[in-house]
């Protein structure tokens, strides 16, 4: 039996879920409209428990034009490749103390930790890539996506799961950060027994024999721990976030736990004031999507009439045997003068309908960044400098919306991943200097988007050097090159281009190479001067 305290906690969690669910009714209806026209597989998932989902349901009845769905898939592919490309290291870890960041042992530690993180993130069982794609898709379409990051069950490692917006509700703290999540989700009796073998209510256990696949609803509440928080404790009471699983039907507490870091990173595309949820790009163009569907519906009718037209004829009984079959001879179809007695009804201006549809498609492509990337495809003969400038322009235009995803989503995601890896003992041992400083770190994003934003700095330096080399070649005076700090340029350019630290020599190694080079030059100079010195000695002896 559960104590009164546990019973009250469970009931409070259920009440909070019901309150948040009721308050989000307008947003859910808005998202349902988008799901019907853009993401049909999500249709019905914003209606909660009142809408049972049948496997294989047809969900695309509202779609007459597939352009919005195609634009969404392209948009998500663009964002995924710009922020988190699978074949690249799209962020680095470094010490948040500038003095520590200069120590090579600290640099190598964070580089190894970063490699460890990427190795576990992209492990086959982690399932990050597919779940990250769905999270970004939800963010673009509905404004908010969510990922549940947990330890791999029964093994060491990480496990990712996209949580559909229709089953999770968020709250913000006083600084606008998402710090509370309440998720209401279904599980079969068999699955529930696997997760809570000791605390599963009898009402659910009874169905295991007769109907083990019957679904029940559960609530997972994660929020900051206000009462009983003791950071010195080693159990879940010492974790900042408290976790509570509740059976919705019985209002029974199933499991209590905690997290050091918020486990539901939220990806909000473009946040509105005083709303805890984001607004997606496809929310802005929903009128265009609706218009496009209506236009396509009309155009299909016009096309049908153009291909299989309605025939107009004089009502004199002459054409009673008329049949619109290819190769048919129709006696009486023309007058003695050759005037056509049967005419097809004009279906309307099909070309104009297509032009109107193109206008709506253009608006959708603009909102989904497709038009922005079409420039490179339409101009394949651009020079490298032009491509660099185009990349810089794209970085400027994409930075505001995608920067939000990096700051909120990736920042929270990486912090949660590192906490899980640390608890499992999978991170390398910290150097003493970092341990003494408390292990503080920061994330430096190295995605293609960030590199395109920094391309202006690198390209500016290279253009300046090229100009000065031209001056040197004309004047034969190398002094203009004296203004450049080549050591700084080499390091900063390598950083801007995402070169790993392990690929670069340390300052000590570089100094040793230079000393060796200087010594070699001195030795060669001495060898070259030896014959002249010997001749001088011989001449002096003869004198």
Image (cartoon, rainbow, N blue to C red):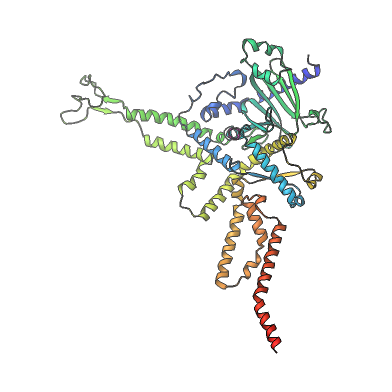
Q: In which quarter of the image is the N terminus?
A: top right
Inspect the magenta stretch and tell me whether residue 525 lies in it: no
Residue nearest the observer in this picture, 86 or 426? 426
Residue 221, image x, y percentages: 72, 25
Give the farthest residue toward the bottom: 543
Q: Where residue 187 appears, x then y in whole percent? A: 64, 20
Nearer to me, 465 or 337: 465
Look at the magenta stretch and give its main secondary structure. Answer: helix
Q: Is 133 contained in the magenta span? A: yes
**Residue occupying the point 70% across, 64% down:** 515
Q: Which residue is drawn at 44% across and 36% down?
A: 357
> Could you tell me which residue is drawn at 59 percent across and 66 percent down?
468
What stretch of residues is rendered in magenta? Answer: 131-136
Does residue 271 appear anywhere in the picture?
no
Farthest front residue?
A: 542
Q: In which quarter of the image is residue 151?
A: top right
Residue 239 in view here: yes
| In the image: residue 541, left or right of residue 398 | right
448, above or below 539, in the image: above
Say which quadrant the C terminus sits in. Answer: bottom right
In screen coordinates, is 290 left or right of 407? Answer: left
Report the front residue among 277 and 185: 185
Q: Residue 503: where, in percent of width, then height?
A: 65, 52
Specify the quadrant of the image occupied by residue 93.
Answer: top right
**Percent x, y for residue 480?**
62, 68
Is 116 situated left or right of 232 in this image? Answer: left
Instruction: Tally the marks.
Output: 0
Residue at (67% x, 60% y) in the render: 487
The quarter of the displayed image where residue 251 is located = top right
């Amino acid at each position: 039996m559960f104590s009164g305290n546990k019973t009250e906690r469970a009931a409070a969690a259920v009440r909070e879920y019901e309150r948040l669910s009721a308050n989000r009714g307008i947003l859910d209806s808005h998202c349902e409209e988008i799901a019907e026209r853009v993401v049909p597989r999500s249709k019905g998932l914003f209606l909660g428990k009142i809408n049972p989902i049948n496997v294989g349901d047809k969900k695309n009845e509202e779609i007459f034009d597939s352009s919005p769905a195609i634009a969404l898939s392209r948009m998500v592919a663009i964002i995924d490749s710009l922020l988190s490309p699978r074949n690249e290291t799209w962020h680095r870890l470094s010490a948040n103390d500038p003095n520590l960041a200069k120590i090579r042992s600290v640099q190598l530690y964070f580089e190894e930790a970063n490699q460890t993180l990427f190795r576990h993130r992209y492990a086959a069982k982690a399932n990050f890539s597919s779940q990250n794609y769905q999270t970004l898709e939800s963010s673009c379409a509905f404004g908010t996506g969510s990922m549940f990051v947990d330890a791999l069950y029964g093994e060491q490692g990480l496990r990712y799961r996209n949580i559909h917006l229709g089953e999770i509700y968020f709250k913000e703290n006083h600084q606008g950060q998402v710090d509370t999540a309440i998720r209401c989700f279904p599980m079969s009796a068999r699955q529930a027994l696997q997760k809570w073998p000791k605390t599963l209510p009898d009402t659910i256990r009874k169905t295991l024999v007769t109907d083990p696949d019957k679904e029940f609803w559960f609530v997972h509440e994660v929020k900051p721990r206000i009462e009983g928080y003791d950071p010195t404790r080693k159990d879940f009471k010492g974790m900042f976030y408290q976790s509570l699983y509740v059976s919705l039907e019985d209002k029974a507490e199933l499991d209590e736990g905690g997290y050091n870091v918020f486990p539901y990173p939220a990806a909000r595309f473009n946040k509105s004031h005083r709303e805890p949820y984001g607004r997606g790009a496809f929310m802005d163009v929903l009128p265009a999507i609706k218009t496009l569907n209506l236009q396509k519906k009309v155009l299909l009718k016009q096309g049908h009439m153009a291909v299989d037209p309605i025939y107009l004829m004089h009502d004199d009984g002459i054409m009673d045997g008329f049949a619109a079959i290819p190769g048919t001879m129709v006696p009486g179809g023309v007058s003695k003068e050759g005037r056509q007695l049967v005419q097809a009804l004009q279906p309307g201006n099909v070309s104009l309908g297509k032009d109107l549809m193109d206008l709506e498609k253009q608006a959708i492509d603009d909102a989904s960044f497709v038009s922005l990337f079409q420039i490179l495809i339409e101009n394949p003969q651009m020079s490298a400098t032009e491509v660099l400038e185009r990349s810089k322009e794209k970085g400027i235009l994409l930075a505001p919306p995608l920067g939000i995803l990096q700051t909120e989503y990736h920042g929270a995601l990486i912090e949660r991943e590192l906490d899980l890896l640390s608890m499992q003992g999978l991170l390398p041992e910290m150097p003493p200097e970092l341990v003494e400083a408390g292990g503080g770190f920061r994330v430096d994003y190295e995605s293609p988007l960030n590199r395109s934003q920094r391309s202006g700095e690198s390209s500016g330096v290279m253009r300046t050097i090229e100009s000065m080399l031209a001056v040197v070649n004309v004047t034969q005076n190398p002094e203009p090159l004296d203004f450049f700090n080549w050591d700084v340029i080499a390091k900063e350019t390598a950083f801007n281009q995402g070169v790993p630290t392990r690929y670069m020599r340390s300052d000590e190694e570089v100094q040793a190479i230079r000393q060796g080079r200087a010594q070699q030059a001195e030795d060669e100079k001495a060898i070259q001067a030896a014959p002249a010195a010997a001749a001088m000695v011989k001449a002096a002896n003869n004198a």
